[in-house]
Amino acid sequence: ISYAKQVILSEVPDYDWWYGCSPTAAGMLVGYYDIHGYDGLRYDNLVPGDKAELSTFSSTEGGWQYKAQYAIASPEHVKDFYSGGYGASRDDVDPPYHNFNSLADFMGTSQDSAGNSNGATTFYFYKNGSPLYVADICGTIYQNSSGLYGIWEYINYRGYGTHNPVDDRTMFNQYVDTYISGGFRLNDFMSEIDNGRAVIIHLDGHSMLGYGYDTEGNIIYVHDTWSEGDHTMTWGGTYGGMQHIGVTCVHITGGSPVPIPHSIMLIGSGFFLLLIFAKRKDSVRSET
């Protein structure tokens, strides 16, 4: 007898498209860690200011109504790389550019120098289906146009991560097994979710965030950057007419310890002092 299993991560940000689907998907990912932390550590500086919002629907381009939008694509990014509107190219200002401060900056989104038209981001994959890590991209001609490497740069820019791209294997792109034999499997996706990690889902032309699954029907849950709410698709199938081809996984590191509330510290100190007092009292008794 086999039983269906459903696991859905709770309070996963659901963001409206903001100057590129890939930085928006990455923004939901870092927003999730900003809100919840991971593995007992805090990552609450991934989105500057207070905690990241759970939703940015509905948004108006040029408005920056939410903190998360500054992390995804800042006003400076749009000014330097997006003046021609969606799909345009050769509209970047002449360098020097602003100091990079958003995911879209580091990911090469909309940047002519990265070969991306406005709204587009490039992700590289190994053709044999194996994972492509940050360490594999570092120092190559693909580094400055890699969306994966840009996510790594942004996380490190915000004060987290390994700070050592040469050996970094905490983040990777991989084709899915339904697209390339030997690729990332549904079981691998389930393991990521079971361990509290959302996954960027790549279609052939769009990026989303995966945050849950249902083994009955091989269903995964996604936030698609287009409309608010829970959406589903079949693993390895199509969504919006586009084929599911790959994933980006981020195993975040370098967080800060969660501080102990002052009241708990006082209670803990009280217990500690009581234990010391009791021990001293017992030792005095043993001498009489």
Image (tube, rainbow, N blue to C red):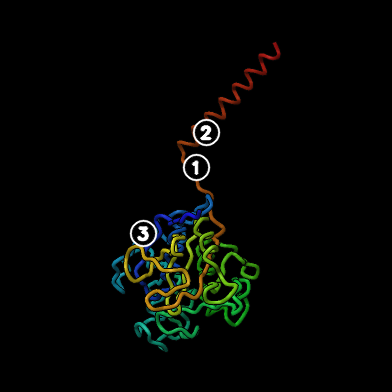
Give the percent coordinates (x, y) of residue 237: 44, 73
- The answer to whether any part of residue 99 appears in the image is no
Which residue carries the number 2 mark? 268
- CA gap between label 2 and label 1 equals 10 Å
- CA gap between label 1 and label 3 equals 25 Å
* Amino acid residing under circle 2: Gly
Q: Crowding at label 2, few (<14), some or many (≥20) Cα neighbours within 10 Å?
A: few
Kindly identify the residue that appears in the image at 56 percent across and 67 percent down: 171
Element under disc 3: loop
Q: Which mark is residue 54?
A: 3
* Amino acid residing under circle 1: Ile
Frontmost residue, 183 versus 170 = 183
**CB-based contact (under 8 Å), mark 2 and mark 1:** yes
Q: Crowding at label 3, few (<14), some or many (≥20) Cα neighbours within 10 Å?
A: some
Q: Is residue 20 left or right of residue 63?
A: right
* Name of the residue lying farthest toward the front: 1
59 shown above or below 109: above
Element under disc 2: helix
* Amino acid residing under circle 3: Leu
Which residue carries the number 1 mark? 260
Q: Earlier in the sequence, mark 1 or mark 3?
A: 3
Give the percent coordinates (x, y) of residue 25: 43, 69
Frontmost residue, 47 versus 178 = 178
Q: Earlier in the sequence, mark 2 or mark 1?
A: 1
Element under disc 1: loop
Kindly identify the residue that appears in the image at 38 percent across and 69 percent down: 224
